[in-house]
């Protein structure tokens, strides 16, 4: 009919919202010859903005071009991609003029980081794909669109719905409205970060510190016969620096260094006073008066009680709440266990220590605090399997539960490793998963053959030990 624009079927299926703004003459002029006349006509008569209940958004290419070029890097001689529209969940549609007669429109999904050709004709895209429920519902799913509208409300031009990926992995759907361009830039920055090489290790403890705290930890001196000094704990990217002053004051700093940029983040700072208490066993126990803030993590309380170990290799500060874990590591592997469970003495000018997340070698038994000595089994515990649980029906489950004749009263603890003795032809290994006073449940790792049957699994009478000497 006379007067209808070429993309009228699109307009009929997706009426423009009242907020649409007609394109300016300057914008139309810049894209004359670069975009099909039909799209420029749509811009001029109905404008940029949201269309239809599916909230398809026609966008200003100028605002999006640099972001698209970051996603898809092309040679200068390559066909130019022009961003033209957004779906409600942030998928970007872009146009390419391939030859004098050939063209296509493709999608770029910033979440899945994928592209695909949607149509070989711009007119078909608008009048066919975006106007036919049978086609458009394949990539703008009605159920998700309804959920977005219910949870976050209707979109404004330039916005997109975003699904929280962490909650989605836990089968929880949370959808928010966000600035679509900022979302693309954020997701593209994540790609750049993943592709960036790791940051060089800091050359000193001072270099790893957040700059604003370097002065605060500068003048901390060690004093013979006193716990005063600087102590450092590192675990993967996390660091903790404790300053103990001779006057009984302390500072405790938590932070992490980004493994890609080296920049400090997650900073939490505590200060106050500490007391040195002599326990009944003759140990020195330091008590820090930690006062939590809204930025605190629950695990920060693990540093409020620290045993001072004055060993021949130098002092260590041991988390009182982690003595059992350390005892298990000492008895089973002759290490101190996870490096986050203790502090070592340091100075700001010292080289930053290398990665030692699985723990340093254990000191001599005689150097350990009495409270830790009492938990360490100098001789390996020897347990016998008395019951074997049913094999799991899931072929991907590689654990069989067994029960042994030792319990917590005999010294077994949760997560303690148990293995076949060195002299045994068996090669069983597992961990304590269930604890009771006189018997414990052990999760034994097993292998399966090509039929899914368990090979050389645990049997009643098999012996397990806490250390294979």
Image (cartoon, rainbow, N blue to C red):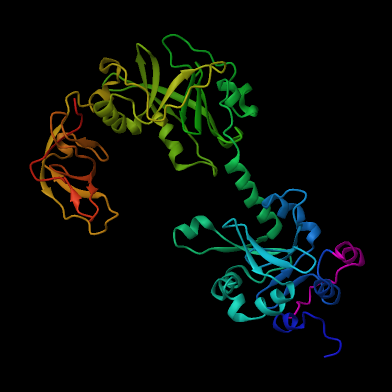
From the viewer's side, name the closer residue of 431 and 414: 431
Instruction: Give above or below for 51 relative to 228.
Output: below
Instruction: Give above or below for 242 relative to 2.
Output: above
Instruction: Give above or below for 389 relative to 359.
Output: below
Label the magenta part by its dominant secondary structure.
loop
Residue 304 appears in the picture as rendered: no
430 on left or right of 35: left
Write the start and end of the magenta stretch as one range. Answer: 15-33
Which residue is at 47% across, 28% downward? 234
Which residue is at 23% across, 46% downward? 446
Q: Quadrant of residue 217?
A: top right
Residue 421 image point, x, y percent: 15, 31
Q: Quadrant of the C terminus?
A: top left
Residue 17 appears in the picture as rendered: yes
Residue 115 image point, x, y percent: 62, 60
Instruction: Farthest residue to the front: give it.
Output: 100
Number of numbered tags placed on the structure image: 0
From the viewer's side, name the closer residue of 213 and 146: 146
Q: Quadrant of residue 208?
A: top right
From the viewer's side, name the closer residue of 309 and 75: 75
Residue 104 image point, x, y percent: 70, 67
Q: Quadrant of residue 330?
A: top left
Which residue is at 45% across, 42% downward? 298
């Amino acid at each position: 009919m006379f007067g209808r624009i070429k993309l009228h079927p699109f307009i009929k299926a997706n009426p423009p919202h009242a907020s649409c703004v007609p394109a300016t003459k300057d914008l139309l002029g810049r894209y004359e010859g670069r975009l099909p006349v039909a799209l420029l006509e749509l811009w001029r008569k109905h404008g940029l903005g949201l269309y239809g209940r599916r909230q398809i958004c026609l966008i200003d290419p100028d605002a999006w071009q640099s972001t698209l070029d970051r996603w898809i890097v092309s040679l200068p001689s390559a066909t130019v991609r022009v961003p033209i529209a957004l779906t409600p969940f942030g998928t970007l549609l872009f146009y390419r003029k391939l030859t004098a007669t050939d063209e296509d429109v493709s999608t770029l999904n910033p979440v899945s980081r994928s592209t695909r050709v949607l149509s070989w004709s711009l007119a078909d895209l608008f009048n066919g794909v975006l106007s036919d429920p049978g086609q458009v519902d394949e990539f703008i799913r009605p159920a998700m669109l309804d959920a977005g509208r219910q949870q976050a409300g209707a979109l404004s031009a330039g916005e997109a719905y975003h699904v929280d990926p962490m909650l989605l992995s836990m089968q929880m759907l949370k959808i928010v409205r966000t600035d679509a361009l900022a979302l693309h830039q954020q997701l593209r920055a994540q790609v750049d970060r993943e592709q960036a090489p790791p940051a060089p290790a800091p050359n000193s403890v001072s270099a790893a510190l957040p700059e604003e705290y370097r002065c605060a930890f500068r003048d901390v001196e060690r004093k013979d016969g006193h716990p005063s000094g600087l102590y450092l704990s590192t675990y993967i990217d996390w660091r903790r620096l404790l300053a103990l002053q001779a006057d009984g004051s302390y500072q405790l700093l938590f932070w992490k260094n980004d493994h890609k940029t080296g920049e400090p983040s997650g900073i939490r700072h505590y200060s106050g006073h500490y007391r040195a208490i002599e326990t009944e066993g003759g140990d020195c126990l330091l008590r820090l008066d930690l006062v939590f803030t809204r930025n605190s993590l629950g695990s920060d309380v693990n540093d409020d009680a620290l045993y001072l170990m004055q060993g021949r290799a130098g002092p260590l500060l041991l988390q009182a709440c982690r003595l059992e874990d350390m005892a298990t590591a000492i008895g089973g592997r002759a290490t101190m266990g996870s490096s986050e469970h203790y502090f070592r003495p340091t100075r700001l000018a010292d080289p930053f220590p290398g990665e030692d997340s699985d723990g340093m070698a254990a000191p001599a038994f005689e150097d350990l605090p009495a409270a830790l000595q009492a938990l360490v089994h100098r001789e390996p515990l020897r347990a016998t399997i008395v019951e074997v649980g049913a094999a799991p029906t899931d072929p991907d489950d590689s654990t069989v539960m067994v029960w042994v004749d030792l319990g917590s009263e005999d010294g077994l603890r949760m997560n303690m490793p148990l293995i076949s003795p060195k002299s045994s032809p068996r090669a069983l290994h597992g961990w304590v998963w269930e604890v009771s006073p006189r018997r414990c449940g052990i999760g034994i790792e097993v292998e399966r053959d090509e039929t899914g049957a368990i090979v050389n699994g645990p049997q009643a009478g098999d012996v397990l030990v806490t250390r294979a000497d």
